[in-house]
Amino acid sequence: MKKFFFALFSIALLSSGMALNAQNLKFGHIESQRIIVQMPEYTKAGDSLNVVKEKYDLQLERMQVEINKKYNELVENQNVLDSLILESMFAEYQSMGERLQNFQGQVQTKLRNLEGVLLESVMAKLETAIKSVAVELDLIYVFDISGRNPIYASPKSVDIGPMVKEKLGIQ
């Protein structure tokens, strides 16, 4: 019987200790999207992406001009040329269109991948600053509320955005 009361007393004591510890838990929150767009590295990444995109756009425009020329040539000569020649010209026109579509798909994939690579280092820098502030404030979790999740942030939750911006040197 003594063992039972001792075990019960131990459980109660441990439970009260856990309850006390639970009251000291500190949470933080941040709107990372608001901060990331202010980072100079983000702007540089966007600029680099735009330079590459402009080169691809120029090539796509050249290809479209060539397709338009081929189409106009087909329309102008459809009543004059032999059907075999017209079929050959039409096949060439279709092939040019397929190459353009293929190139557009490759461009989109390449730009998406490049964007991921460029933003990876920006995100890593932001995460490092967030982790540093969280450690300094002894937080157990930091929630990113950019996507409206969680919907509610208690006043007891620490908004670490200003401190992260300071760590990143953002005004």
Image: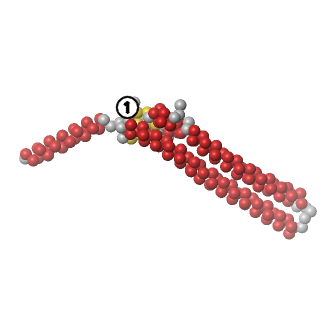
- Image-based side of 98 in relation to 111, left or right: right
Is residue 167 in sight in this rendering? Answer: yes
Instruction: Specify the farthest residue to the left.
Output: 1
| Colour mode of the rendering | secondary structure
Q: How many marks?
A: 1
The residue shown at (57%, 41%) is: 41
Is residue 148 in sight in this rendering? Answer: no
The residue shown at (22%, 38%) is: 16
- Image-based side of 130 in relation to 101, left or right: left
Looking at the rendered structure, the secondary structure element under dot 1 is: loop
The answer to which image quadrant residue 132 occupies is top left
Instruction: Specify the farthest residue to the bottom.
Output: 84
Q: Which residue is mark 1?
A: 156
- How packed mark 1 is, by other alpha carbons closer than 10 Å (few <14, some 14-19, many 20 or more), is few
Tell me where residue 73 appears, x and y as whole percent: 86, 58
Q: Is residue 98 above or below residue 56?
A: below
Tell me where residue 163 appears, x and y as whole percent: 45, 33
The amino acid marked with disc number 1 is Lys
The residue shown at (46%, 43%) is: 128
The answer to which image quadrant residue 104 occupies is bottom right
Tell me where residue 165 appears, x and y as whole percent: 49, 34
Q: Nearer the viewer, residue 26 or 88?
A: 26
- Image-based side of 91 in relation to 157, left or right: right
Q: Nearer the viewer, residue 33 or 129?
A: 129
The residue shown at (39%, 30%) is: 155
Tell me where residue 143 appears, x and y as whole percent: 43, 40
Q: Nearer the viewer, residue 78 or 37?
A: 37
The answer to which image quadrant residue 85 occupies is bottom right
Q: Is residue 80 above or below residue 52?
A: below
Instruction: Specify the farthest residue to the right.
Output: 80
- Image-based side of 54 in relation to 29, left or right: right
